[in-house]
Amino acid sequence: MSRPVVPAGTHPIEQGGYILPTMEVKRLMESLTKIVINRLPGMIVYGRPRIGKSRSVEFALNYLPTQLGTFFPILRTQCKSYRVPTEEKFFGDLLADFKFAFPSKRNPSLMRRQIVNLMLEQGERSQMRRIMLVIDEAQRLTEYHYNWLMDIYNDLDYEKISMTVISVGQSELLARREFF
């Protein structure tokens, strides 16, 4: 059996397209699985910049449905930095990150309804009636963002869909949690 020919510069190691499951990543996978099984509302993953938090979460989430043995919807977003946060910008970013094809333009309440409907649809397809929202760069979330997320959470809860939010970011997340 001969080795495959891989052109120079195209191997995943050369391109940085790989994640090694270290002990920390495995612990993260276990924690995420426990959170979902125990129906907890969320978790914070934090640390210094550029140490691999986002990649670790990505690796763990790719294997979460296998761990659970069932379809489990996971929506991912990255909190953008704006001088003045608005519902329109926040909901627009969520819809774009969720790859929603037809977002409402300039109407925050319609945009929020689209987000809730998308999450409801995903949650209803799951046997567990649960979804997970992963927010990267979560240290950028303001009190407004948390209130808007709480509205979405409550809308889903009213429809008997549970949402787990995984906040990924820098150490400032701990201060935010204590503040709120």
Image (cartoon, rainbow, N blue to C red):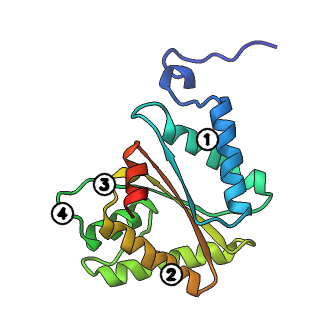
Helix or strand or loop: what does disc 3 sit on? loop
The mark that comes first in sequence, 2 or 4, is: 4
Q: What is the three-letter code of the residue carrying label 1?
A: Phe
Q: Amino acid at mark 4?
A: Val
Q: Which residue is mark 3?
A: 80
Q: CA–CA distance between discs 1 and 3?
A: 22 Å
Residue under label 4: 84
* Residue labelled with disc 2: 154
Rendered position, 176 above or below 10: below
Residue carrying label 1: 59
Determine contact: label 2, label 3, CB under 8 Å: no
Q: Which mark is residue 140?
A: none
Residue 40 in sight: yes
Q: Nearer the viewer, residue 86 or 146?
A: 146
Question: Residue 152 at x, y = what percent?
Answer: 46, 77
- Label 2 and label 3: CA atoms lie apart by 23 Å
Point out the frontmost of discs 2 and 3. 2
